[in-house]
Amino acid sequence: MPMKDDIWKKIDEDTLTVSDIPAYYELYCEIAHTSTEIQEDIKDWNANIYFECGDNADHWLKIQDGTLHFGQGKISNPDVTYQMQEDAALRLLSGESDTLFEIYGGNLSISGNPPDTDNFGWIDEHIKGEIRRQLNRKKTDAIPGNTYTLSKEDYLKLTAAIRLALAEPPQDSQAYPEMWGEDDSIGLRMEHRAQQNPDKIALLYEDVTFTNKELNEWINRYANYFLNEVELKKGDVAVVFVENRPEILFAIFGMAKIGVISSLINTRQRENPLIHSIKHSEAKAFLIGEELVDAFEEVKSRLELTEKQQSMLFFITDKNEKEMPKDYINLNEAIKDVDTHNPPTTKDISVMDPYSYIFTSGTTGLPKAAIITNLHTIGSAFYWGKEVVKMTPDDTVYITTPLFHSNAINIGLAAALGGDSAMAIRRKFSASNFWKDARKFNATFFNYVGEICRYLYNQPPRDDDADNPIVKCAGNGIKNEFWMDFKKRFGIERIIEQYGATEMGIPNFANRFNLDCTVGITFSEYSIVKYDVDRDEPIKDKKTGCMIKVDPGEAGLLLGKIDIDTFYMYKDGKASKKKVFRNVFKTDDAWLNTGDLIRDIGFRHAQFVDRLGDTFRWHAENVSTEEVENVVNSFEQVELSCAYGVIIPGTEGRAGMVSIVKKEDEEFNLKGFLNHLKQYLPDYAVPIFTRFQDEFETTATDKVQKVKIKNEGYDRNKLDDPLYVLLPGSSEYTSLTPEIYEEILKGSYRY
């Protein structure tokens, strides 16, 4: 039998074999007998549990009178029998998986008394958690952070939800035949809907509705025009700069049917970020909404458009309030007599073909084009629409976020595709009109980012708040502090919080079993590793130099396992490589750095904690501190700057703050500075707070000690430096007085 130290090593390195089972369970029972918490769990519970996992691996655990016993071989009359393959058994032993996950994944079957299974699953997780803690104590002197894990009540709710899910028959949806094939695409899905249910409502916008047939015909006008008249071809790119109205969907699906990639530009971008996004697209055609033509015209001369590109400017009319600039083609007029039949190209589109770019700030620098393939959205439709949200043809999705945002595409639109459900859209989100819209559209489901739920929650309570058709919502960012009140006030049965991102390789969690205050579960391979926030780097094993997985209940940096040979994330390959850690747990392994702190709360469930590094979220947008610093540093009176996010009570995400070292000791032109920021930054990236310092503290390598500055925030009672704040509705920075500071803390100002 291997020595105890050998077993510790094998558990840590995930190299256990079936021959190690006796030594493993000797250690397992020893841990159980020395843990006061575990002893409390098993003191009043007796059970015989048999594990059938191969001719050489059959074993049993007997729990009797508060004592755990282990044995090998057969056992007569077990209370519970576990049947599993060898690989599943080893995953369970190593702590890489748990019984609930293996049951749900179909790798573990159970016969016997379910309550015994429930008790054992709970105890087993705690024993393995203690093994992980003891392993970590051997590897580092780091002090464990605050911990929180699922309660026994949550665990029992989870087991009941899993049993229910396993007992449910598969849903039948005409829109979703078996998964997907190589020649599947979002365009094909739309054609299938139009063929199967031509008269069913597909899209609602203001007072206009489109049936599946009508929506598909509008999409076909776009597809056939750009295919036959403009002669775009598969692989070409078209910039789409349009607000949330039906035309943006016509463009996305129409281009997708002919293999053209829609580069979806953030409609809030102006100046440098807008120029960067458009140039980065390398587009052949430009679809510009009337409502955004002024913003496009302001930067057009700096886009370095070729003569051919300048002949491909298409104007999409809106309210006919603006005159079309010269040299544009009126797209509404151009397509009015175009063929409405399905183009011949749809069948040639592969599920792996990209159909859109969605711009994300990633972790540093200007926005990057994340590649969205048909598989991205069809996979989301199957997973989100059918498996998680359980959409049906009777549902209507109210898409609350802009359609250039991955949340709108991969949660809202994908859910509608998956359930053959209708979509409702609004040009811009309105908290005061949301519930009126929900009733008008008879919406049963909406997608959200945390800010949206906060805006709704902050509306004055009404007697009819719960009198609405919404039964479920899905998204990311709702805070635990008002989760339960939000559900109760608005009568929502399910909050399907999720964690994920536009980019490939990031593990996607989803609260598919309706637990409260969690981002749910993921089936992706992931790890959460210990992280030193002050040093802004992962904590490593003193001997091996490898990263260390967190203790149960502890927060750490989330990593996603990737295949480095097939990995891509952004259109810019160099930007993709910057996101990868190598040699994390063993030589040459590759893991994606998500840049987010996540808490492991047990049973493959997690809670989102915070965003790390050089990006923060504000008003549902990622803000790159590098981008902000570049703009601030370009102001003539600034020597050096440091941008970061700070918390304002009662808001979601972090508000922008910038600390500045001036070039000279002279009066700073705050008005000119704010005008400069507004010219070159989108509104959500303009810093709310500005601090002036004589100098920055730096490391030995001259790196600004941003963590210290960030922790100091805008605390007027502790800082003597000049501090200024941009109050809501104000057009200038105001001195942050103690009185204004206190009002901000009270939530008197609505940001």
Image (spheres, helix red, strand yellow):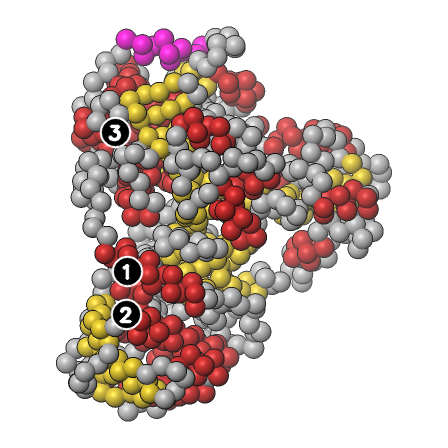
Question: Does the rendering let one see residue 219?
Answer: no
Q: Amino acid at mark 2?
A: Pro
Snapshot quadrant of residue 104:
bottom left
Let me know if residue 65 is in the magenta part: no
Task: Kindly check if marks 3 and 2 are in contact, taking CB atoms under 8 A apart as contact.
Answer: no
Residue linked to disc 3: 190
**CA separation, marks 1 and 3?**
34 Å
Q: Residues within 10 Å of mark 2 (few under 14, many from 20)?
A: some
Pointers 2 and 1 in contact (CB under 8 A)? yes
Choose the circle earlier in sequence order: 1 or 3.
1
Instruction: Mark yes or no: residue 11 visible.
Output: yes
Quadrant in which the C terminus is drawn: top right
- The CA span between labels 3 and 2 is 44 Å
Q: Which residue is mark 2?
A: 114
Image: magenta residue range: 327-337
Circle 1 — which element?
Answer: helix
Measuring 53% from the left and 56% from the top, which residue is drawn there? 609
| Residue topped by disc 1 | 163
Q: Nearer the viewer, residue 256 or 590?
A: 256
Mark 3 or mark 2: name the one nearer the start of the chain: 2
